[in-house]
Image: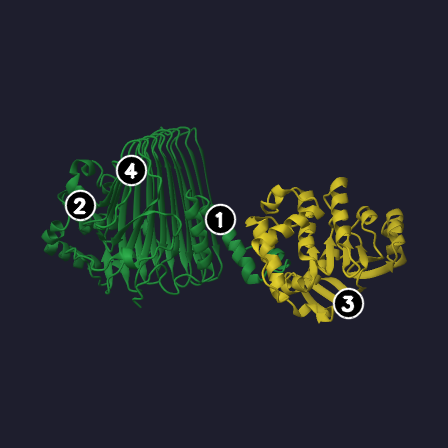
Chain colours: A yellow, B green
């Protein structure tokens, strides 16, 4: 599904990603862990196409298409979804208007007719239940005045609406209390199928207790330095990252 | 004084002609204003209040003026289709500078309400109108206003007597339609008595793409506890110059909402002077301008807090694209005894393009010591990270920016208290942003082009 080859990327001339290689197959859940500043969020931004980052080398192939040739909107329409670490507040843009525009642009891309107002509202109602999103929130401006937990729930709600093939959850657990974490994780699990894949980016084991990964990677200084099964999560939790640094001969 | 000379000569030569097509009480006011204008001339850019707009140049064009008040031969009620449907208004027309009398139409206005031609009504009700006409405009130093007083012969008059509520919106369509380059000086007077209430929508249209200059002055008197809404919508074309001056005096506990929306116009100058003359009176004053190409919108507002316990809220937003420019000069003056004043002013602007320019000058002058006042002004661009957030959900860059522009002006639209009008304005704003407005003159079925 996703194949990243020797990916290098800069922001403001500073190299953050220094040769990433990653393969994600349909149905797999990958976790990417690593200390602060290792490039985890940069990787998710680059996959989603954030123009603030410049790709200097390498390629990203998604279902046979070169993602780097596509605009962020076309990547989304092809089935990439990024759950933001810091979702943006957009005063004056209603959730309904935002989601209707997004859903209909996805449909147009696939050659489908726009949804009627009533079908759209029905879809909203169904999907809100996935993350127990309050009606009040759905009637407000995008993320405006939402708590940290509500913002993350709103991200998963949008994911439910857009039904992506590959979801990237960038630090979705940050700022969540244990109840919100459970709701968000259960939402993600409900949306899981045999065909779609998930990349979970996180610092901690916490979220991975709920969303169980098939493969775990450690990202360090812009490179994937270790890949293993889910047992790696426990090992990192016990030993910290110093153990990896020692393996790399840095300590 | 080259630009002025032609008008000075015109006035002197045709004074009797001007007078004979107006009312005597309008004529009484001419001499003072003419002298004021003849002495000071048109505003030029050395004047602080006109730094960013060259009105002298606009007035120096060779315009036709309909001083003989030749009747308008076409019935606007037949060819004009209002672009603000669904508001079900009482509609009146001022064509160029003459009120268009419609003898067929029966307006079902509440008893005692007078609406019609200022010229005719000031002949019919001279005592009523004499106590208001030119009482606010006379004190200004703006010579475009005195120019209007010197030349104006007609316009719209609205009187709502004590305690009467006019539910339906009253709509005044100012229309330019001449076949030649033309100037119009129309004059409006609105009197809302104690406890009364009315809403007025003023639309500006130009039926052809010619060099038109409209110089319109409106005086509004709002009585004790009265409510008045004033919505102004300019939807013309690149070649039109619109100079509009609005003077408002509010008695105690009165509530006024003013919103001025420049959807499309070449050069716009909006002057608003609000006098909070009675305790516990309040005003909400807002507006937006959407400019592209070489358009310019210049807003100049003065809110005089003359009495204690009054409140004002001011909100203006501009969206500038192309090589458009905008200027906002907002002055709030809190007089010495106006304690417990609440005055808040906001001006926010987006320049979509590096060539677009915005000049903003908020100023508060406070002579009282127990007040709550603020002002804020920003000029910026659309936020990149927000655009990316929307794009990452599959929304195209163009559409993402569209959504953000709609969102940006949303709170100005929310100032409009007539729901149907608010909806329609949203629609027109969307069309404007999408470049779908005025492919042909919106609202016209005359096919004059």
Q: What is the CA distance from the residue labelled 1 to the residue labelled 4?
A: 33 Å
Residue highlighted by disc 3: A3
Q: Residues within 10 Å of mark 3 (few under 14, many from 20)?
A: some
Q: What is the CA distance from the residue labelled 2 to the residue labelled 4?
A: 20 Å
Regarding residue B75, the answer to whether it shows in the image is: yes
Label 1 or label 4, whichever comes before in sequence order: 4
Q: What is the CA distance from the residue labelled 4 to the residue labelled 3?
A: 74 Å
Q: Closer to us: mark 2 or mark 3?
A: 2
Q: Closer to us: mark 4 or mark 3?
A: 4
User: At numbered mark 1, what does the secondary structure look like: helix, strand or loop?
Assistant: helix
Is residue B230 left or right of A246 when viewed as pictured? left
Is residue B15 left or right of B222 when viewed as pictured? left
Image coordinates of residue B255 in percent, x first then y, are 37, 35
Do the residues at discs 1 and 3 belong to one chain?
no
Image coordinates of residue A209 in percent, x first then y, are 83, 47
Residue highlighted by disc 1: B410
Image coordinates of residue A31 in percent, x first then y, are 81, 55
User: At numbered mark 2, what does the secondary structure look like: helix, strand or loop?
Assistant: helix
Q: Does residue B89 lie above or below A27 as drawn?
A: above
Q: What is the CA distance from the residue labelled 1 to the residue labelled 3?
A: 43 Å
Where the N terminus of chain A falls, by quadrant? bottom right
Q: Chain of mark 3?
A: A
Q: Chain of mark 1?
A: B
The picture quadrant where one finds residue B96 is bottom left
The picture quadrant where one finds residue A218 is bottom right
Label 2 or label 4, whichever comes before in sequence order: 4
Do the residues at discs 4 and 3 belong to one chain?
no
Residue highlighted by disc 4: B110
Residue highlighted by disc 2: B120
Do the residues at discs 2 and 1 belong to one chain?
yes
Q: Disc 2, disc 4: CB below 8 Å?
A: no
Image coordinates of residue B137 in percent, x first then y, are 25, 43
């Amino acid at each position: 599904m996703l194949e990243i080859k020797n990916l290098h990327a800069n922001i403001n001339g500073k190299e953050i990603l220094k040769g990433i290689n990653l393969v994600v197959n349909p149905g797999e859940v990958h976790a990417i862990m690593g200390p602060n500043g290792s490039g985890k969020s940069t990787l998710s931004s680059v996959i989603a196409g954030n123009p603030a980052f410049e790709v200097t080398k390498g390629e990203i192939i998604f279902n046979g298409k070169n993602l780097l040739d596509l605009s962020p909107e076309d990547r989304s329409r092809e089935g990439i979804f990024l759950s933001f670490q810091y979702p943006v507040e957009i005063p004056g843009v209603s959730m309904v208007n935002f989601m209707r525009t997004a859903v209909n642009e996805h449909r147009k891309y696939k050659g489908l007719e726009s949804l009627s107002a009533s079908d759209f509202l029905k879809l909203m109602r169904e999907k809100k239940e996935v993350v127990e999103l309050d009606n009040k929130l759905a009637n407000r401006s995008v993320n405006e005045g939402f708590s940290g937990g509500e913002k993350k729930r709103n991200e998963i709600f949008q994911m439910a609406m857009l039904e992506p093939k590959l979801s990237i959850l960038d630090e979705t657990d940050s700022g969540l209390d244990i109840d919100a974490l459970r709701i968000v994780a259960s939402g993600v699990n409900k949306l899981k199928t045999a065909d779609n894949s998930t990349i979970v980016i996180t610092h901690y084991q916490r979220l991975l207790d709920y969303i169980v990964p098939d493969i775990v990677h450690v990202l360090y200084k812009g490179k994937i330095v270790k890949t293993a099964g889910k047992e790696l999560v426990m090992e990192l939790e016990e030993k910290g990252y110093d153990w990896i640094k020692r393996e790399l001969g840095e300590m | 004084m080259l630009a002025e000379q032609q008008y000075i000569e015109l006035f002197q030569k045709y004074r009797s002609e001007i007078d004979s097509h107006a009312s005597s009480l309008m004529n009484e006011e001419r001499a003072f204003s003419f002298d004021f204008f003849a002495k000071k001339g048109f505003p030029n850019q050395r004047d602080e209040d006109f730094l960013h707009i060259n009105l002298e140049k606009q007035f120096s064009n060779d315009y036709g003026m309909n001083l003989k008040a030749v009747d308008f031969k076409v019935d606007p009620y037949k060819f004009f289709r209002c672009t603000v449907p669904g508001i079900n208004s009482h509609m009146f027309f001022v064509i160029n500078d003459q009120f268009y009398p419609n003898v067929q139409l029966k307006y079902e206005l509440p008893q005692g309400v007078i609406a019609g031609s200022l010229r005719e009504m000031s002949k019919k009700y001279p005592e009523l109108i004499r106590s208001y006409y030119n009482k606010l405009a006379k004190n200004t130093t703006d010579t475009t206003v005195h120019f209007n007083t010197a030349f104006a012969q007609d316009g719209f008059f609205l009187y709502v007597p004590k305690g009467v509520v006019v539910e339906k919106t009253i709509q005044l369509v100012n229309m330019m339609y001449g076949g030649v380059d033309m100037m119009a000086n129309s004059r409006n007077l609105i009197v809302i008595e104690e406890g009364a209430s009315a809403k007025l929508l003023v639309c500006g249209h130009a039926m052809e793409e010619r060099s038109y200059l409209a110089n319109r002055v409106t005086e509004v008197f709002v009585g004790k506890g009265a409510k008045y809404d004033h919505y102004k919508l300019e939807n013309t074309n690149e070649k039109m110059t619109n100079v509009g001056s609005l003077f408002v005096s509010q008695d105690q506990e009165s509530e006024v909402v003013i919103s001025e929306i420049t959807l499309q116009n070449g050069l716009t100058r909006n002057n608003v002077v609000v006098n909070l003359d009675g305790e516990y009176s309040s005003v909400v004053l807002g507006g937006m301008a959407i400019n592209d190409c070489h358009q310019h919108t210049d807003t100049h507002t003065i809110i005089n807090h003359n009495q204690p316990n009054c409140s004002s809220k001011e909100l203006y937003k501009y969206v500038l694209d192309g090589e458009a420019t905008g200027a906002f000069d907002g002055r709030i003056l809190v007089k010495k005894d106006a304690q417990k004043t609440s005055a808040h002013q906001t001006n926010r602007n987006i320049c979509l393009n590096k060539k677009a320019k915005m000049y903003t000058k908020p100023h508060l002058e406070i002579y009282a010591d127990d007040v709550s006042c603020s002002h804020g002004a920003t000029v910026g661009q659309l936020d990149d990270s927000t655009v990316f957030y929307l794009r990452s959900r599959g929304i195209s860059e163009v559409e993402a920016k569209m959504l953000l522009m709609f969102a940006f002006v949303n709170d100005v639209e929310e100032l409009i208290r007539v729901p149907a009008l608010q909806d329609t304005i949203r629609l027109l704003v969307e069309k404007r942003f999408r470049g779908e407005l005025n492919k042909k003159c919106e609202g016209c079925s005359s096919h004059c082009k």
